[in-house]
Image (cartoon, rainbow, N blue to C red):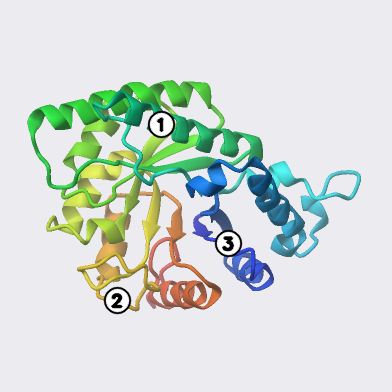
Amino acid sequence: MNKLYLIPDRKDMERICALAAVYGCAFEYNDFFPPKVMDDPERQGKIIDDYKACADKRFGGNSSEKDMSGECAFSDIFSRDTMHGAFLDVTIHSDDPMIEHVSKQRVRQSMETAKDMGLKGVVFHTGRLGGFRAAEYLRNWRDRNEAFFTEIALQYPAQQIYMENMFDEAPDVLAGLAEKMQGVKNFGVCLDYAHAMLSKCPGREWVETLAPYIRHIHINDNDMKNDLHLAVGAGKLDWQEFDGLIRQCRIEAPVLVEVNGYEAQKESLQYMKSHGIYPMEREREE
């Protein structure tokens, strides 16, 4: 299992592919959730073709990544990767039938893209109103998401579905959905630790509450006030605390270093390695 993920940049693939090769990173694609891309099959195809053309750069022409004709086995390469699904204005639990319909359509479009590419999984957001704790609203969110994503998981058994906390104020609501969906093998939680640390809820509570359900993790840094997507180590988050919590809870989920651009990615990976931040190995004590 790949333990690290990077966001690729089609304009700088040579350097990012080299960096990914050094650290054994797979990719998580952020190209496919904008509505203008989702509604333009030709544009989607061009993006996919661009990534196929870069396949050799990812593995340095390693023959083990090619089929018998000498061509790169693209399905094998993409099968390690994930993508961010539609999330802008996606509200599965809406009481407005038109909004609900379009939201579900966007999710299905994302799943179709992932299926066509042979990707490992897709990340979606909770899409709920952070801080709004009306009991009826929370039950409605949980029940409608459970019904819909159970259906989607059955329709796309080859893809994992990861539900990510966005600006949720606490982990309990997401944990409640994950608990209800424990029997759905290809559904789990994506813990966005940077988002969690923007809430008033301690990191320990986030990790310990969601630990049984975490299948994917997003990390980046911020100032504890805004979602800045800074390089890991460049903000105010306590990464030793993060590392300790993940290891104490025996979480083995892969981690996306969710920063854009080669320099920020390199800075993040170097910081994580030098400080032994999960999933990097800690230096052994003499």
**Which label sits in the foreground, 3 or 1?**
1
- Residue position for label 3: 8
Q: Is residue 279 above or below residue 270?
A: above
Q: Amino acid under label 2?
A: Gly
Q: Residue at x 39, y 23 (%)?
A: 150
Q: Nearer the viewer, residue 247 or 83?
A: 83
Give the label on residue 102, or none: 1
Q: Is residue 146 left or right of residue 205?
A: right
Give the label on residue 235, or none: 2
Residue 72 position, x and y percent, is 80, 50
**Which label sits in the foreground, 2 or 1?**
1
Q: Nearer the viewer, residue 282 or 90?
A: 90
Q: Residue at x 60, y 34 (%)?
A: 115
- Disc 2 to disc 3, C-alpha distance: 22 Å
Q: Is residue 274 left or right of residue 168?
A: right
Residue 3 position, x and y percent, is 50, 55
